[in-house]
């Protein structure tokens, strides 16, 4: 009787082991399927703001403000709209796409060179497909935002709500083919061939732009060559402590006879609590040969501006409230900044209160 009982016991153990192994295999297979199962995402943001010059005119005849900093976005007076940004993405094991649409003044400024051909070209911020050729190589084909610069078009990813001169007068977007290559855990390389800068819908010149980027541990050196003109850009930053971050950006642009600019900006940012942070942007921007970014210049075509922007960022769930003080000081007072009587002055101070909701 004992031998029979032991035999049954062994059989039961063997049967239980088979069940456990089968269950483990099924769970592992399901987890693997979940990891490789294609996924669809839908994200975006909505932003609006109030802006007032503290020592300048606050009207905007014909929709153009009389007095505003010479940089993109957040330049309209009074209660103003930013943009609604809707981003749809599909990610498979090897391939995927991103469709990024924008509606509103900020989006219009971002894609200023469209539409050229399509009636809806003025709402397409990004539109590209990609292929993960291997773990180290990804090819992207279509319209994508620029790889140059510290700041981006979406207000969600910027600490300051208004944008810098370096961002405003660098490229915004490109259409073409790029290859992102992971050389090691720390080093990366990007190579691209594209339409002329910001010519996102089609190529109307028959000429092409070439880009390259070398990255090392969050520091990036960028190069853009566009029909004789070129821009060299460094973008990076360092976590100096758990609560203090320092961002850096520097660039030089040579317009091949159409003027040039150079500038540098620092972005110290301090997180004071889970829901509040404060950050400063200090930027020096200079142009030569009447490049046109600053608006006025000497008889030699040279001009410069120093801009300091102090921004607070309070987080309430998915909503960010950003109060901001900004002071822009030009190298001369020949008419770039205007006071309340529309008389030329050297500096312009302004206040912005922005609300940015992301999902």
Image: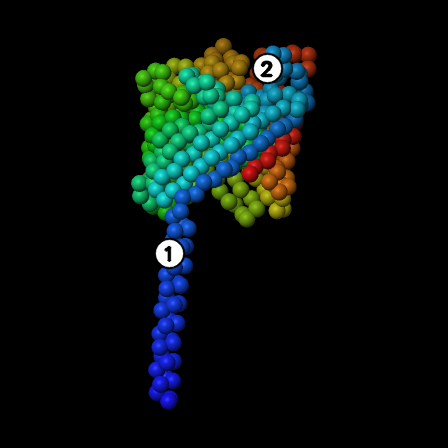
Decide if residue 59 is on the left or right side of residue 163: right
Query: Dividing the image into 4 quarters, which one contains the C terminus?
Result: top right
Find the residue positioned furthest to the top. Answer: 299
Q: Is residue 63 above or below residue 188?
A: above
Give the camera-side residue of 137 and 239.
137
Residue 29 numbered tag: 1
State the residue at coordinates (60%, 34%): 356
Residue at position x 38%, y 76% from top? 12
The vertical placement of 301 against 33, above or below, is above
Judging depth in this view, the residue of 264 and 58 nearest the camera is 58
Mark 1 vs mark 2: in front: 1
Which of the numbered marks, if any, corresponds to residue 64?
Answer: 2
Check the image and tell me how it is coloured.
Answer: rainbow
Dot 1 falls on a residue whose secondary structure is helix
Query: Can you give x and y, in whole percent of width and height, for residue 145 in the image?
Result: 44, 29
Q: On the image, which quarter does residue 314 sit in?
A: top right
């Amino acid at each position: 009787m004992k031998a029979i009982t032991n035999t049954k016991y062994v059989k039961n153990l063997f049967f239980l082991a088979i069940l456990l192994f089968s269950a483990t295999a099924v769970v592992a297979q399901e987890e693997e399927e979940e990891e490789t199962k294609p996924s669809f995402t839908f994200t975006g943001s909505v932003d609006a703001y109030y802006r007032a010059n503290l020592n300048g005119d606050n009207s905007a005849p014909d929709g153009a403000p009389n007095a505003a900093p010479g940089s993109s976005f957040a330049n309209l007076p009074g209660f103003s709209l930013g943009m609604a940004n809707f981003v749809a993405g599909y990610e498979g094991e090897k391939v995927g796409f991103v469709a990024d649409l924008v509606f509103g003044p900020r989006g219009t400024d971002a894609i200023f060179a469209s539409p050229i051909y399509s009636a809806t070209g003025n709402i397409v911020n990004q539109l590209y497909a990609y292929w993960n050729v291997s773990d180290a190589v990804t090819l992207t084909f279509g319209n994508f935002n620029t790889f140059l610069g510290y700041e981006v078009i979406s207000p969600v990813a910027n600490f300051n709500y208004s944008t810098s001169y370096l961002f405003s007068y660098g490229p915004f977007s490109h259409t073409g083919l790029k290859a992102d290559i992971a050389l090691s855990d720390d080093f990366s390389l990007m190579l691209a061939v594209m339409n002329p800068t910001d010519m996102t819908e089609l190529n109307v010149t028959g000429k092409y732009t070439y880009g390259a980027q070398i990255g090392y541990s969050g520091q990036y050196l960028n190069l853009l060559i566009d029909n004789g003109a070129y821009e060299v850009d460094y973008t990076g930053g360092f976590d100096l402590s758990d609560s203090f971050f320092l961002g850096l950006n520097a660039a030089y642009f040579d317009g091949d006879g159409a003027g040039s600019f150079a500038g540098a900006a620092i972005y110290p940012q301090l997180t004071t609590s889970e829901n509040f942070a404060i950050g400063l942007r200090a930027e020096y921007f200079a142009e030569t040969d009447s490049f046109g970014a600053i608006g006025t210049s000497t008889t030699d075509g040279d001009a410069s501006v120093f801009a300091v922007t102090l921004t607070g960022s309070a987080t309430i769930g998915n909503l960010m409230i950003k109060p901001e003080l900004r002071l822009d000081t030009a190298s001369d007072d020949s008419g770039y900044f205007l006071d309340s009587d529309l008389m030329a002055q050297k500096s312009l101070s302004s206040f912005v209160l922005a609300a940015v909701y992301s999902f």
